[in-house]
């Protein structure tokens, strides 16, 4: 009903996608090298070694924790 009433807006964004697991990845399902301290097992939301808050885009050499593969950016749409 909200959509019919024009109350929702569709936005398209690019998010990390694991092609092997066939799923979009939340930030905790992405690991890589911390750009702040160089720790090579930082998550996509925070480095456990130095405590820096991160976004997945900040990681160096990101990989999926599900498959170990390098994720790709894929567009997805969400209603707001």
Image: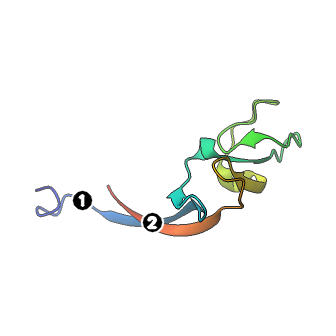
Along the polypeptide, which appears first: circle 2 or circle 1?
A: 1
State the image quarter where residue 73 is shown: bottom right
What residue is rendered at 11% in x and 61% in y?
Answer: 5
Is 16 left, or right, of 47 in this rendering?
left
Residue sitting at x 53%, y 61%? 22
Above or below 15: residue 59: above
Residue at disc 1, secondary structure: loop
As drawn, the residue found furthest toward the right would be 38
Which of the image's four quarters has the N terminus? Answer: bottom left
Q: Residue 2, percent across and down?
A: 15, 55
Q: How many marks?
A: 2
For image coordinates 66% across by 51% down, the residue present is 56
For the residues labelled 2 and 1, the Cα–Cα distance comes to 16 Å
In this rendering, the label closer to the viewer, 2 or 1: 2
Asked if residue 38 is positioned above or below residue 51 in the image, the reply reads: below
Q: Which mark is residue 8?
A: 1
Instruction: Tell me the residue that label 2 is attached to.
Output: 76
Q: Quadrant of the C terminus?
A: bottom left
Left or right, residue 11 beside residue 35: left
The color scheme shown is: rainbow
Q: Secondary structure at mark 2?
A: strand
Question: Quadrant location of residue 43?
Answer: top right
Q: Position of residue 28 (x, y in %)?
A: 61, 41
Q: Is residue 15 depicted above or below 40 in this figure? A: below
Neighbour class for label 1 at 10 Å: few (<14), some, many (≥20)?
Answer: few
């Amino acid at each position: 009903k909200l959509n019919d009433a024009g109350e929702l807006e569709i936005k398209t964004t690019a998010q990390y996608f694991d092609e092997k697991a066939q799923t979009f990845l939340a930030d905790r399902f992405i690991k890589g090298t911390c750009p702040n301290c160089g720790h090579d097992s930082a998550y996509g939301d925070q480095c456990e070694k130095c405590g820096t808050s991160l976004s997945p885009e900040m990681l160096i050499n990101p990989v999926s924790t599900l498959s170990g593969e390098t994720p790709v950016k894929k567009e997805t749409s969400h209603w707001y």
